[in-house]
Image (cartoon, rainbow, N blue to C red):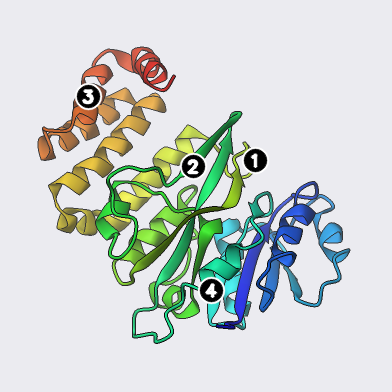
Amino acid sequence: MNEFVSVIMPVYNRQDTVKQAIESILEQTYSNFELIVIDDASTDNTANVVRTLTDERIRFYSHKRNLGGSAARNTGVKQAKAKWIAFQDSDDMWRKDKLEKQVACIPKQLDDKPPIIYTSFYRFKNGKKEYIPNKDSRKKQGNIHKELIEGNFISTQTVMLAKECLEEVGGFAEDMPRFQDWELWIRLSEKYPFIWVDEPLVDVYYSEGSISSSQDKIVIAYENILQKHKQRFQKAGSKYYASYLCSYGHNLCLAGDVKKGREILFQAYRLNNKSVKCFVSLMSSMFGTRFYKQIYSYYNR
């Protein structure tokens, strides 16, 4: 199969990493692609670094003002010439056979539901290397809508999908301060099947600047997702809705809003009183933010 692929890379103030990230795409064993780089109004030397790369497959666009990663990806989707779209970030690395192995997963006969094809990845954070998705009991391919309500295990840089899928659901939500990918997968998984390539074909480097680690933004993102998808969560069933509320309440407690966090955790526990995680979180919230964070740190050692 020799499908043409549009690879979309948003970039903002990544003069030190963008060249290496682009080269990891240009060096793919699968070569039938275009690379669309969207500079989201960088204020450093990023644009000049990109322009030094003369590969004819590169197409470069610039926003006049900073609109955020979701808007940049949506701009790239609009400019894409290919039926299939993949994403890369400007500070991460693709393994050389990443595209080749994903293209090989495209069914020869496509019905009206083309699959979203994603791979495993290594996440490098705080000196630790983590394989994602981990080997828990959640289903990882096929219809995984309910599994994604429980939590995200798919990173944007690992995904390849048909352009028509994004056009149908509306692309990336530009009002999300965090979890733009998770919110999109929730919408897509309601309509399309997923195929999982269980190999670490992307290296994702977590840094303070790549995506803000602000706890306040995390809480806002949880609230936005709840407002957008509450009916979907309720439809999925109490177990899945409770799992989402438990994560939301937990993050409220970490952000210092223990009162609201406790209220959300209590809602979660009422929906699923068999969840040990929810029970421990709820009990810990009774003793305030400091105690809650201490318990959280203890269990994450």
Which residue matches tag 3?
Answer: 282
Around disc 3, counting alpha carbons within 10 Å, would you say few (fewer than 14), some (14 to 19), or many (20 or more)?
Answer: many
Comparing marks 1 and 4, which lies closer to the viewer? Answer: 4
Circle 1: element type: loop
Q: Which residue is mark 2?
A: 131
Please give the residue where the numbered disc 4 appears in the rendered image: 103
- Residue at x-position 31% and y-position 24%: 258
Q: Position of residue 218 (x, y in %)?
A: 44, 40
Q: CA distance from mark 2 to mark 4?
A: 22 Å
Residue at mark 2 to residue at mark 1: CA–CA distance? 22 Å
Q: Report the mark closest to the observer, 2 or 1.
A: 2
Q: Earlier along the polypeptide chain: callout 2 or callout 1?
A: 2
Of the numbered discs 1 and 3, the one sitting upstream in the chain is: 1
Q: Secondary structure at mark 3?
A: helix
Q: Which residue is mark 1?
A: 209
Q: Position of residue 206 (x, y in %)?
A: 59, 40
> For the residues carrying marks 3 and 2, which lies nearer the camera in this image?
2
Q: Amino acid at mark 1?
A: Gly
Q: Is residue 60 above or below residue 4?
A: above
Instruction: Please state which amino acid type lies under the numbered disc 3.
Output: Leu
Whether tag 1 and tag 3 are in contact, CB under 8 A, the answer is no
Contact (CB < 8 A) between labels 3 and 2? no
Element type at marker 2?
A: strand
Camera-side residue of 40 and 233: 233
* Left or right position of 239 against 20: left
**Earlier residue among tags 1 and 4:** 4
> Residue at image x 67%, y 57%?
66
The label shown at residue 190 is: none
In percent of the image, x 35 and y 52: which residue is there? 225
Q: Quadrant of residue 125?
A: top right
Quick one: 74 or 294, which is closer to the camera? Answer: 294
Foreground label between 4 and 3: 4
